[in-house]
Image (cartoon, rainbow, N blue to C red):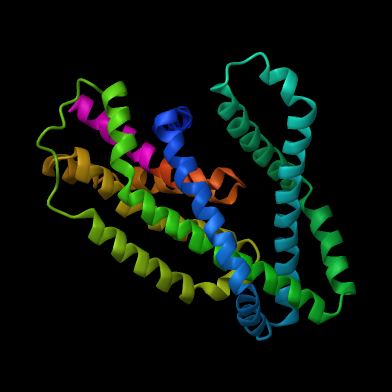
Amino acid sequence: MEKVNGYFLRSIKDILRWSVLKHALGIGLPLMALWVWIGWLYWDRAVSLTSQIVSWIPFSIVKANGALFILFFIWLVAVLVSFAVITALVGPPILRKFKEKTYYFYTFATLLILSVGWALVMLFKWHLINTQIQKLLTLLPFQTVADGISWLVAFYLFYNLFILSLYLIISSFRKSFLDTLKRTDYPNIDTSGSGISKKHHVSVLRDTVIFLILSTVLFPVLFIPVANIFVQLFLWAWLYRESYFLSICSLYCNEEDYKTLREHKYTIWSIAAFASILNFLPAINIFTPFFAQLMFFHWIMEHKSTS
């Protein structure tokens, strides 16, 4: 786990390099805008579908899950509002003391700290906050609670499609920013003649199809508080773990490297899980596929440097 933490910290540093950041912003922001537009066009249809699904769920489950969704929404608003307040009141005098390239570090680090901070606050105050939300939902008529849950589930569907499309695109555009890091960080590691027989494109397509099937099969679990978070984390980690590991190996591993590294299943799952957690963080989520790629990249390069 200590090594995985090291790969994570190195990936944070790498994500702020312009060679990586320009890909993350150039791909992530337009793709997010595209899904916002698609969501706006098909929102009513999506809500109609999710309303029908919610109508099959007992009210006690809808109420409990509604409390969790509302808590997540409160956390999201708290992170974004506190970031806006800090940036407006504290940001200018702080940023004037730094160079322009540190602006990205400020944004990323502040969002990460606020996300973790507010999550810890709500975790420690979970019973108090959850009790008050449960009381509020009890006072509301069922249709009001059901409508609110339907909107949130519709948002979840579009959000998951955004994550999936970002995962697919980064799978194809990984080489340009990884080669730049290879030249600067690992210039003495010889990767000439690398390349494994297994094609990562097949793995990406296979995992995408299975991810969609599993998401459909496990969809009812979304209405079970707490379990829904762990199931979604598992699905994202499962999506990243094999195909992204294979996508890096297809560039820098020979057959012997691949056979050795694939035996370290715990490391592969740990890297995928670490990266997947970022999908829960607002704004930072557009960097998640890059984090997964970068962590696998550093792990593989470290292996090659010692082999």
**Does the magenta portion include 295?**
yes
Pick whichever, 197 or 165, lies toward us.
165
Vertical side of 5 occupied by 206: above or below = below
What residue appears at the point 30 percent right and 22 percent down from the top-left corner?
A: 184
Residue 204: quadrant of the picture? bottom left
What residue appears at the point 45 percent right and 36 percent down from the top-left corner?
A: 22
Vertical side of 131 occupied by 57: above or below = below
- Magenta range is 293-307
Left or right of 170? Residue 252 is: left
Q: Residue furthest left?
A: 193
Total number of numbered discs in the rendering: 0
Pick whichever, 140 or 82, lies toward us.
82
Instruction: Return the x and y of residue 216 as percentages of the image width and height.
Output: 47, 75
Instruction: Return the x and y of residue 283 as percentages of the image width and height.
Output: 60, 45
Q: Looking at the rendering, in which quadrant would you find the N terminus? A: top left
Q: Is residue 270 visible?
A: no
What residue appears at the point 43 percent right and 59 percent down from the top-left corner?
A: 165
Q: Is residue 295 visible?
A: yes
What residue appears at the point 75 percent right and 37 percent down from the top-left corner?
A: 84
Residue 42: quadrant of the picture? bottom right
**Does the magenta portion include 279?**
no
Vertical side of 113 occupied by 282: above or below = below
Q: Looking at the rendering, in which quadrant would you find the C terminus? A: top left
Left or right of 16? Residue 79 is: right
Instruction: Return the x and y of residue 30 as percentages of the image width and height.
Output: 51, 51
